[in-house]
Image (cartoon, helix red, strand yellow):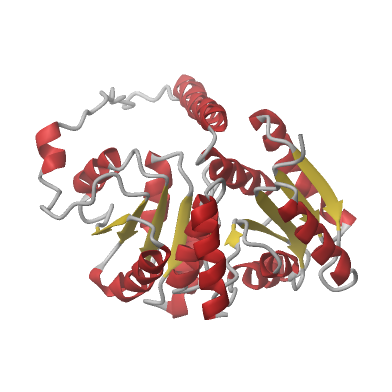
Amino acid sequence: MGPKVMILMGSASDFSIAEKAVTILETMKITYDLQVASAHRTHQKVKDIVTESTKNGVEVFMGIAGLSAHLPGIIAANTHKPVVGVPVEVKLEGLDALFASVQMPLGAPVATVGIDRGENGAILASQIIGVQDKEVRKNLSDMRSKFFLKVDKDQKKLEKRLNGNYYSKITLEEQKLTTSHINKLYSDNKIENPEVAIIAGSYSDIKVAKRTTTFLDKLGITYDLRILSPIRDPKMFESYMGQMENVKLFIAISGLSAHVTGSVVAYSEKPVIGVPCARRMDGFDALLSMVNMPPGVPVATMGIEEGGNAALLAAEMLAIGNDDLKKRLLKFKKLII
């Protein structure tokens, strides 16, 4: 069996980051290959690897690079498969590599994770493969449970150190959502079993969301679109996530502190694509909030207000094993590039 994930490093010095990814893929029992190829020094080698890998069944590519970090973009230029970008800190605290990876032009999306987050890159690749693979989804769920157990263990350790006279512990009880609460959320035109759930954090983000839905319409991908904030209405947000548990992936669109993406990954193990919006600071605040997620909960971050690329990345994910969608995707890319 050939590799399902192809990892390309811009330099052998990036191996410590790639090693994090390899550890996750071994845990997920996903086959992979690892190559060193520079977008600038060995451009043809990159192109040859990507072209041949696409033909031979690789489902997801990972590009790991620092400095100008054009490697993920060159990979995306030569394949219709999803590309995960992992920026590496070499200079400027990794911001140069981050921007080179995430701010891609329309037609060549790169699902960028946080700086040096090789593990999150591999988890995201696993989530993408898991859209079609039940066994990988199970392995992801098991891993997520281990993250929860670690937090719970840390909590118990901390409690042993809290011996103040006024320490008063609150015992939390699990809250279950009622069917009546969930049903209040929906209008009569709800799409049954959508493939993608799109959540915009505010009405001010609707322009970017419409760009996303326009592309999904043209690609024939079903979706549900909601304007919903986990900050302003956390109960309604939780209800919606419960109702959308059968979608294949999420697209979250928001500005400012961009809590929407973080809240979605907290409730779901499915792939989450994040689109930062320029409400303040030219969108820099939202971008960093989305991309710099902690280990275990990656967000496939797009460039600022790149709703079109979010739709294309969703199509690339869903096209794995779907020849009809693959044909529509390739045809559509030729029209927009």
Where residue 291 appears, x then y in whole percent?
Answer: 54, 59
Residue 239, above or below 232: above
Q: Nearer the viewer, residue 160 or 111?
A: 111
Q: Nearer the viewer, residue 280 or 250?
A: 250
On the rendered structure, is 65 left or right of 202?
Answer: right
Where residue 100 appears, x then y in whole percent?
Answer: 67, 72
The residue under the point 47% across, 57% down is: 273
Q: Is residue 312 visible?
A: yes
The residue under the point 48% across, 28% down is: 148
The N terminus, quarter of image: top right
On the rendered structure, is 232 left or right of 161?
Answer: left
Figure label count: 0
On the rendered structure, is 180 left or right of 150?
Answer: left
The C terminus, quarter of image: bottom right
Q: Nearer the viewer, residue 195 or 42?
A: 195
On the rendered structure, is 243 left or right of 252?
Answer: left
Residue 138, above or below 24: above
Q: Nearer the viewer, residue 329 or 280?
A: 329
Residue 282, above or below 163: below
Write down the quadrant of residue 101 in the picture: bottom right
Where residue 110 appears, x then y in whole percent?
Answer: 60, 64
The residue under the point 83% across, 62% down is: 48
The residue under the point 70% across, 53% down is: 62
Residue 245, above or below 157: below
Q: Is residue 295 visible?
A: no
